Structures are given as C-alpha cells and as structure tokens.
Image (spheres, grey):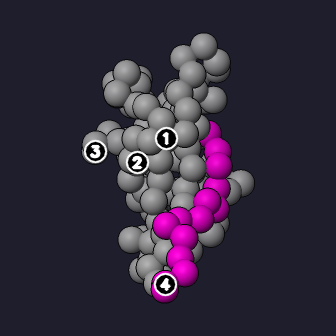
Amino acid sequence: MKNYEPSRRIIDSNVAGFSHWDGFLVFDRLRPGTKLKLKAEFDNPYDPNAVAVYFKGVKIGFVPRRENFVVAQLIRFGHKDALEARVTSVNPLVHPEEQVQMTIMVTDAR
C-alpha cells in the first residue's frame, strides 16, 4: 500500500498587493478552493524573489515578500508543477490587503 499525502501546506497568507493590481476585476469570482496560478518574476526591480499570483490570467497580487523565497526557488529550479495555490477565504469587509487569503501547497508526487 502506498503511503502518501495529497499535499502539504507550506504557506498560508494574504495575497499581497491585492489593492494595487486587478483583483477587483475578479473579486466576485474568488471562493474558497479557487485555484490560483503562481508565476515568478525574477526580473522584478523591487524583489528578485517576487512571485505573482494570477486568477484566470488576471494578476491579483503577490506572495508576500516575507514568505516568497522558498516558492521562488522551487519555481527557479523547475519544480513549479509541484506547487498548488488556492484561495482559503474571501472577506470583503476587511482592508483590501487582507481580503483574499491563500494557501500554497507542495503536492506529493510519490
């Protein structure tokens, strides 16, 4: 019998910069469980480990700088497919920077 876990959480955080990008365009479509796409921005002039967060091609923000190093390195070394990001909560009543919470998981490929 194969012993595995479907995924393991490595980061739980807000989507940083949500109020500065186009999150408002898709806010009404974000729900807990919604899949997000991660894209490294190694040429980002503010943070060489920047990892942008997208929903259906719309950039909604970033993985917070304080938490992006491991994710950026996994993507840099070709392990992007091992990562999965999903919305964990949406709250329109809080500050825009805290409205969308996400989790980033590493998937079990064994």
- Please rate how many residues cluster around mark 3, counting C-alpha atoms within 10 Å: few if below 14, some from 14 to 19, many from 20: few
Q: Nearer the viewer, residue 52 or 13?
A: 13
Kind of residue at disc 4: Lys
As drawn, the label of residue 59 is none
Separation (CA) of disc 3 from disc 2: 10 Å
Separation (CA) of disc 2 from disc 4: 29 Å
The answer to which quarter of the image holds residue 109 is: bottom left
Question: Residue under circle 2?
Answer: 36
Q: Residue at x 49, y 41 (%)?
A: 87
- Please rate how many residues cluster around mark 4, counting C-alpha atoms within 10 Å: few if below 14, some from 14 to 19, many from 20: few
Question: Residue under circle 1?
Answer: 87
Q: Earlier in the sequence, mark 3 or mark 2?
A: 2
Residue 5 seen anywhere in this rendered image of the structure = yes
Residue stretch in magenta: 1-15
Q: Nearer the viewer, residue 75 or 101?
A: 101
Separation (CA) of disc 1 from disc 4: 29 Å
Residue 83 percent coordinates (x, y): 47, 65
Q: Residue at x 49, y 75 (%)?
A: 108
Q: Earlier in the sequence, mark 1 or mark 4?
A: 4
SS for tag 1? strand
Kind of residue at disc 1: Val
Does the magenta portion include 64? Answer: no
Separation (CA) of disc 3 from disc 1: 15 Å
As drawn, the label of residue 57 is 3
Q: Earlier in the sequence, mark 1 or mark 2?
A: 2
